[in-house]
Amino acid sequence: MSERRLATLKGFYQNYVKPSYEMAHKAREEGKLVAWVASTFPVEILHAMDIIPVWPENYASLCATRKVSVPLCESAERKGFSKDLCSYARCVLGSLFDGENLPEGGIPKPDILVASTCACDTHMKWFQVASRIFKKPLFLLDVPYNVDSASPEQLEDRYVQHYVCQLEDLVSRLEKYSKMKLVDSKLRKTLTLSNKTSELWLKVQEYRKSVPTPMGAREAFSAVYFMLCVPGTEQAVGFYEELCAELEQRVKQGVGIIEDEKYRLVWDNLPLWFDLQFFQYLETLKAVVVAETFSHVWAGGLNPSKPYESLARKHLSNMANCTIERRIELIAALVKDFRANGVILPTNWGCRMMTIGETMVKEKIQEMTDVSSLILDVDSTDWRNYDEFKVKTKLETYLRTLNSLFKIGETRRSAL
Amino acid sequence: MESLKLIRTLISANNKFISEWKRLKRPVLGYTCSYTPEEIISAGEILPIRILGSLEPPKLADVHVSTNVCSFAKSCFNNALKGEYSSLDGYVFSHSCDNQKKIYDLWRRYTTIPKAYFINTPHSTNENSRRFFRDELEKFREWLMKSFKVEISEENLRSTIRTFNENRRLLRQVYDLRKGNPPLVLGSEALEIVLSSMMTPKEEHNKLLQVLLEEIDTREDVPKEGVRLLVSGSIMDNSELLRLIESVGGSVVADDLCTGSRYFWDLVNEEEEPMTAITERYLHKIPSSFMYSSEERFRHTREMAKLFDVEGVLIFSLKFCDVHSFDAPLLAEELREEDGLPVLCLEWDHSLSGTAQLRTRIEAFIEMLEEQI
Ligand code: SF4
Ligand code: SF4
C-alpha cells in the first residue's frame, strides 16, 4: 500500500516542521523577535511585521507524536495544574518546568505572546501563565462571541468595529514594543498570499471529494500546518501548488489513497496525535477519512484592501467562535459534499469547546443527513486514559452498522 | 435567629417572594453569571434570580453532557431539565466561560423556558471593551423592554441602583461581623445570606438584612473560635462545603467567590448617568477568573486575607472549571510567597461526591495550622 502515499508529503516533518523550529531558535539568538501565537489569532499581522511566530499548540502535538507529551503533562500537574486542563497547555507548560531532552530543543522562548479569546478560555489562561513565567507581555484580542453564528457578511457592524479597533490598538502596541513598523503594502502582500494559500487548500479539499479519495486524514493533519501556522508565505503557496498537482494526477488516474474504499468518514476535532497510526488502522478496515472539520475552519477569503476588516470578519465567524449549530451545519455539509457515510466525533478531555454538545451534534446530523455518528471519548495528547482496545472495538462495531447504510449511499452515488 | 432561618428558605427558585411576585403576574428572569447587570432587569419590574444547581446527581443532564464538563453548569442544566425553573419567563446567559457558552446551546434546545438571551460580556477592561459593553447593555435593555413590554426609564434605573447599593452596603456590614474573634456569623451563614440576596427582590432583602443586623447583637449561639480561613474559588452555590470546613475546626471568615464577596463588593456610581455607571461597575468589578487579567482578582484575594486577618487559605477548584484551575497554582504561589500564608489547593465536584477525602485533607491542613499558631 505504501506506493499509494503522496510524494509531496514524504518527509514532511523533516522538510518543513523541523526547520521551522530551528529557524525560530536561530532567529532568537540573532535578536529577532519571537512571538508565541495561539490559533485563531490573525498571524498575518506578525508575518507582515517580520515577527517570528511559534505555535505552542503545534509544539504540543509534536510532543505527542514523539510520545513525550505525557511526562510533560505530568510535570505541569506536579506544579498544581489540574489533570483536567487542556493537554496542549499542560504539555507545553510542563516542558517549561522540566525541560530535558525536549523535541527540537524545546519550544523557542517568546519575547511576546499573542492570543485571542476566539476559540477557548484555555488560550487566554494558558498564555497568561506563560507570560508570568517568562515575564513577557501578553497581547490579547478580546473577541466577542458570535452568538448568532453570523457569516462574515452578516456580522453586526459593532462586532466588526470592536475587533478592528482592538486590532489597531494591538498593532500600535506591538509596534511600540518591537520598534518595528507594520507597513501597509507588506500587510496587503501577506494577505494576498494568505488568500492564495486558502484557495489552494480548499482546492485540495475539492480533490478529496473524488471517489476514491486521493488523500486521507493522516496527510491532511500534516498538510494543514501551512494553512494554520504560516498561511501568508510563499512557502505555503508553493507547497499547496505541488500538492494540488499531485492530487490532480491521482484523481485523473482514479487512484485512491487506499485500495478498497468502503467507508468514507468525516472526522471532527483533533486526531489522536500520539497514535497517528490510527488512520492506518482505519485503512485496514477499508475506511478513509475524506474530510475533517479542522481542515475547513481556517480557510476564508481576505480582502487585501480592507485588511483589518476582513481579518475581523474571518475570525469572528470562525466555527470556534460560534454556537454548536454552526458546527452541525458544517459537518452536515461535509457529509453531503464529500459523500461520507460515517462521522467520527472524538471529544478532547480538557477541551470544553470540543466536548460539550456532542450528543446534540450526533442527533442533528442523523436528522439532517441520515448518517449516524460515533462519539469517541479520547484526548488528543494525553494517552493515559486511552483504552485502545475499547476504542477500536467500538469503532469496528460502528463501521459494521454503516454497512447497510452504505448501500443506500451507493444508490445515491450512482445517481450522481 | 429568626432572620437567618428565613434566609435559608429563600435559596430556592420557588421561595415565598418569588411566588408572590408571580402571583402579581410580574416576570421572573433567571441569570447564570454574576456579570449580569441585575439593575437593568430590576428597573423594569422584572425579578432577576440566579440560576443555581443542586447536590443531586445530574442524571437528566448526563444524557446530553459528558463527564468532563463544569459540574456546576451541568447541575444548573439538570435543574432546568427537571423543571425547577419552569416558573421562569426567560433566562440570560453571559459570555463568561466556555462551559457556559456551550451549555447555552443545550439550554436553547432542550429546555422549555420561553425566552433566552446572551450578553456578550467582554473579557478585558480597556476602552474598546467599555464601549462595546455599553452598547451591549443598551441592547439588553431594549430586549427587556420589548420582550416583557416594560419601561426601563432613567429614573427607574437610578432608584434601582440605590436599592442595590444599599443591599451591597448591608452585605458588607454582614461581612464585617466576621472581622472579630470569634466571628458573629459563620462562613456558611454568610454564604447563604449572599445567595438569598440573589433570589429575593432587593427591597425585601434589605429589610431582612436590617433585621438580621439588629438581631445579631443578642445572638445566643455565637460561633466558636476556629482557625481563620479564606476560601477562594469560582462558584459555591451551596453551603455544605463550608459546613464541612466548620465541622473540622475551621472558621471561614472571608472569601473570594462569585457567589460571595465578588457578587456585592463594588458599588455602582450613583452620580453618573445610570447606564454608563452600570457598565463601569460590571466591567471593573472584582473580576472572575474568566477576565483578563487575573492580577486584579489576586489583589482582591490578598486584600481580603489581610482585612479579615486570616491564617490560611483554601483554594477550591471546581472540576472542569478551566479558568479557575489555571489561576489556582498562580494564586497559591502568590499567597505563599508574598504573604507567607499557608495554602491548600483542592479540587471538588459540585455534587460533593468524594467528600471523605476532602474532609481528611482539610482536617490535616487545619491541624497543621493549629500547631503553628
Ligand atoms: S484543544 Fe481546546 S482547549 Fe485546548 S487549545 Fe485547542 S481549543 Fe483550546
Ligand atoms: S464554575 Fe467556572 S466553569 Fe463553571 S460556570 Fe463558573 S466560571 Fe464557568
Image (cartoon, coloured by chain):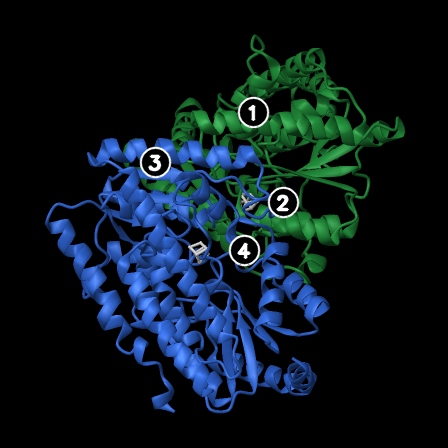
Chain colours: A blue, B green
Q: Indicate the amino acid at tag 3.
A: Leu
Q: Which residue is mark 4?
A: B356
Q: What residue is shown at x 22% (from left), y 66% (from top)?
A: A18
- Label 2 or label 1, whichever lies nearer to me, is 2
- On residue A148, the disc is 2
Task: Say which of marks 4 and 1 sits in front.
Answer: 1
Helix, strand, or loop for circle 2? loop
Chain of the residue under label 3 = B
Label 1 environment density (alpha carbons within 10 Å; few <14, some 14–19, many ≥20): many
- Ligand 2 picture quarter: top right
Q: Position of residue B129 (x, y in %)?
A: 48, 29
Q: Which chain contains the residue that carries disc 2?
A: A
Residue type, numbered disc 1 = Arg
* Corner quadrant of residue B6: top right
- Sequence-first disc among 3 and 1: 1
Tag on residue A257? none
Q: Chain of mark 4?
A: B
Determine which of the numbered discs, if any, sits on residue B134 in the image.
1
Q: Nearer the viewer, residue A415 or B128?
A: A415
Left/right of residue A262 with respect to residue A102 in the rendered view: right
Compute the Cα span from label 2 to label 4.
44 Å
